[in-house]
Image: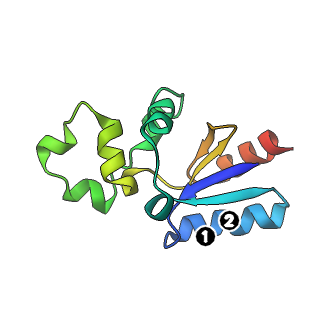
């Protein structure tokens, strides 16, 4: 089963969920604001090949951080405090990231990895 991490107010997350349903891909939604995240999950993600894609430096949340927060060494702690810093949606299977975002290439990857 694919776990989709995001926030329910995010248009991209809603599009992704609708697309997954239309493709018949079994999935579950994990709301970052409601359900939260644990440090071990974030650290595993930051050690993955998707680490560079995870932090959304174009987000409103990022722009509202002060310089010391942006330059913090503990990115996991920053994400725990501000979960909307994650680029959304994050797709996971077996607790490992399989895709980040929702571009055409991500959709193709998801189809390959879930079939």
Relative horizontal placement of residue 49, taking residue 115 as reference (left or right): left
Helix, strand or loop at label 1? It is: helix
Query: Which picture quadrant has residue 102?
Result: bottom right
At 27% from the left edge and 53% from the top edge, which residue is drawn?
62
> Is residue 64 depicted above or below 75 in this figure?
below
> Is residue 75 depicted above or below 17 in this figure?
above
Helix, strand or loop at label 2? It is: helix
Instruction: Tell me, for residue 14, which label it has, or none.
Output: 1
Residue 84 spot, x, y in % from top left: 39, 57
Choose between 41 and 88: the one closer to the eye: 41
Label 1 environment density (alpha carbons within 10 Å; few <14, some 14–19, many ≥20)? some
Relative horizontal placement of residue 62, taking residue 52 as reference (left or right): left
Q: How is the image coloured?
A: rainbow
Residue 53 spot, x, y in % from top left: 46, 40
At 77% from the left edge and 48% from the top edge, which residue is drawn?
1
Q: Please state, as top left, top right, bottom left or bottom right, where the C terminus lies in the image.
A: top right
Instruction: Tell me, for residue 36, which label it has, or none.
Output: none
Choose between 110 and 32: the one closer to the eye: 32
Relative horizontal placement of residue 109, taking residue 68 as reference (left or right): right
Choose between 20 and 26: the one closer to the eye: 26
Label 2 environment density (alpha carbons within 10 Å; few <14, some 14–19, many ≥20)? some
At 67% from the left edge and 46% from the top edge, which residue is drawn?
105
**Could you tell me if the residues under marks 1 and 2 are in contact, i.e. CB atoms within 8 Å?**
yes
Query: Which picture quadrant has residue 19?
Result: bottom right
**How far apart are labels 1 and 2 at the CA level?**
5 Å
Residue 79 spot, x, y in % from top left: 35, 46
Instruction: Tell me, for residue 17, which label it has, or none.
Output: 2
């Amino acid at each position: 089963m694919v776990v989709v991490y995001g926030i329910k107010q995010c248009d991209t997350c809603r599009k992704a969920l609708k697309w997954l349903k239309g493709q018949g891909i079994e999935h579950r939604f994990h709301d970052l604001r409601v359900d939260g995240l644990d440090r071990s999950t974030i650290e595993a993600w930051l050690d993955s090949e998707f680490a560079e894609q995870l932090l959304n430096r174009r987000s409103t949340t990022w722009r509202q951080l002060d310089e010391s927060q942006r330059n913090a060494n503990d990115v996991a702690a920053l994400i725990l405090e501000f979960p909307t810093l994650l680029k959304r949606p994050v797709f996971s299977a077996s607790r490992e990231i399989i895709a980040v975002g929702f571009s055409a290439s991500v959709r193709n990857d998801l189809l390959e990895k879930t079939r």
